[in-house]
């Protein structure tokens, strides 16, 4: 069972993960329009990951007898100055998500809600990976600078990213909850 405060916090996190999905879908769209289909692929894979993050929360709130309340998703930006700009914004957003997860973990600890602490642990670990991925790409983009050839090579590399997330999100939840996907 969740406290009302914890339920509201997890519902807020559902909205933040849905916004993350929306943001990365928007970045994917932008990358395609500027001819960088590998970057577009990378962001679309990230979109799938975020949808899974949202659905895991949704299922958890239901499993705990709560009511997932879906709020409006704000409009993400649609234009970016460069790939470096898009990835700096991505890292900034992930740092916000990390802070948000930490805040809910602090609440679960304060409330002695052991089940939610264990549940949120998966997100704590996931955020380390998310920020790490962004930092790696930002470092490569710094090396590339204004070298178009380098950007095209990185685009080819990012075209190879594949999703480990089931595209039918709701069917993948059981596996994901056991940590075998996502
Ligand atoms: Fe679901 Fe990228 O944090």
Image (spheres, rainbow, N blue to C red):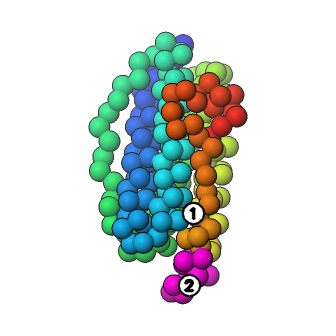
Q: Is residue 174 above or below residue 83?
A: above
Residue 47 horizontal side relative to residue 118, left or right: left
Q: Is residue 32 magenta?
A: no
The residue sitting at 61% across, 57% down in the picture is: 161
The residue sitting at 63% across, 31% down in the picture is: 176
How crowded is the residue under tag 2: few (<14 C-alpha within 10 Å), some, or many (20+)?
few
User: What is the C-alpha distance between the residues marked 2 and 1?
Assistant: 15 Å
How crowded is the residue under tag 1: few (<14 C-alpha within 10 Å), some, or many (20+)?
some
Residue closer to the observer: 113 or 151: 151
Residue 159 is tagged as 1
Magenta-highlighted residues: 141-153
Characterize the magenta stretch by its predominant secondary structure: helix
Residue closer to the observer: 102 or 140: 140
2 or 1: tag closer to the N-terminus: 2
Q: Is residue 56 above or below residue 138?
A: above
* Residue carrying label 2: 149
Instruction: Report the quarter where the C terminus lies.
Output: top right
x then y, percent, for residue 97: 51, 47
* Visible residue check, residue 92: no
* Visible residue check, residue 48: yes
């Amino acid at each position: 069972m969740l406290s009302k405060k914890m339920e509201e916090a997890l519902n807020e996190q559902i909205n933040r993960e849905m916004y993350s999905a929306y943001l990365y879908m928007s970045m994917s769209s932008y990358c395609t329009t500027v001819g960088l289909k590998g970057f577009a692929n990378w962001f679309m894979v990230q979109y799938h990951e975020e949808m899974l993050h949202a659905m895991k929360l949704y299922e958890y709130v239901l499993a705990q007898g709560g009511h997932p309340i879906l709020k409006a998703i704000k409009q993400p930006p649609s234009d970016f100055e460069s790939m470096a700009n898009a990835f700096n914004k991505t890292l900034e957003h992930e740092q916000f998500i990390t802070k948000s997860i930490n805040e809910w973990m602090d609440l679960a600890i304060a409330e002695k809600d052991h089940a939610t602490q264990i549940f949120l642990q998966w997100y704590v670990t996931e955020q380390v990976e998310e920020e790490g991925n962004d930092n790696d790409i930002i470092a490569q983009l710094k090396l590339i600078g204004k070298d178009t050839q380098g950007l095209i090579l990185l685009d080819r590399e990012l075209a190879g990213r594949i999703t480990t997330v089931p595209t039918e999100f709701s069917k993948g939840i059981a596996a994901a909850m056991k940590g075998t996907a996502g």
